[in-house]
Image (cartoon, rainbow, N blue to C red):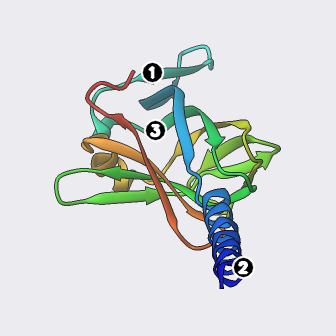
């Protein structure tokens, strides 16, 4: 009887160890660290000589476009690679939010323009840091006020398994 109980305990502990190890390997977390972030309202003009002049403005009504830049480091804490897909920005304000897709130019350097929406897939290797840089412009004047008056900006993506990744990049009142 003691051999039977010892064998049963061994089998149960083996199964529990296998399940716990598998769960711990696949349920790690992706950490996001913001290296830099900026957003500027821009008015473009040409001077009397024909030179292109770019001016920062404070009013969304005066702007021709919004320039933005974001550099983040993502760390995959799990033991298995993770894929982030459908990466986008969400500008959230009082009762409204605007979701914008950046565009990919190549590698992990990501260039944005709101006229072209493309799914971005980023493969995050296990226990490694990956740097992403987004640079671009938004040109839809109908959304300028909502974006400029937003109180926070988020980076949103979907994991390969369908779960949602959401990280607050900045409170826009303090963004530089």
**CA distance for labels 1 and 2:** 82 Å
Q: Is residue 158 left or right of residue 15?
A: left
- Residue 70: image x %, image y %? 55, 33
Query: In this view of the protein, which residue sits in the foreground, 26 or 165?
Result: 26
Residue annotated with mark 1: 55
Q: Residue at x 66, y 85 (%)?
A: 1
Rate crowding at label 3 as few (under 14), some (14 to 19) or many (20 or more) other CA atoms within 10 Å.
many
Query: In this view of the protein, which residue sits in the foreground, 16 or 137?
Result: 16
Residue annotated with mark 2: 3
Instruction: Examine the rendered structure and indicate whether residue 109 appears above or below residue 44.
Output: below
Camera-near label (2 vs 3) is 2
Number of on-image labels: 3
Q: Secondary structure at mark 2?
A: helix
Q: Secondary structure at mark 3?
A: strand
Residue 54 visible to an observer of this rendering: yes
Instruction: Examine the rendered structure and indicate whether residue 25 appears above or below residue 13.
Output: above
Residue 121 visible to an observer of this rendering: no
Q: Residue at x 68, y 42 (%)?
A: 111
Numbered mark located on residue 66 in the image: 3
């Amino acid at each position: 009887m003691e051999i039977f109980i010892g064998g049963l305990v061994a089998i149960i502990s083996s199964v529990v160890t296998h399940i716990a190890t598998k769960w711990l390997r696949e349920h790690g977390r992706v950490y996001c660290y913001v290296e830099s972030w900026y957003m500027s309202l821009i008015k473009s003009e040409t001077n009397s000589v024909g030179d292109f002049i770019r001016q920062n403005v404070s009013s969304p009504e005066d702007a021709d476009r919004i320039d933005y830049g974001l550099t983040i480091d993502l760390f995959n804490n799990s033991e298995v690679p993770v894929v982030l897909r459908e990466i986008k920005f969400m500008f959230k304000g009082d009762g409204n939010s605007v979701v914008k897709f950046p565009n990919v130019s190549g590698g992990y350097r990501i260039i944005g323009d709101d006229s072209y929406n493309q799914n971005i897939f980023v493969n995050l290797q296990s226990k490694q840091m990956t740097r992403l840089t987004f640079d671009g412009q938004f040109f839809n004047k109908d959304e300028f006020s909502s974006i400029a008056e937003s109180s926070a900006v988020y980076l949103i993506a979907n994991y390969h398994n369908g779960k949602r990744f959401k990280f607050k990049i900045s409170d826009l009142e303090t963004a530089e």
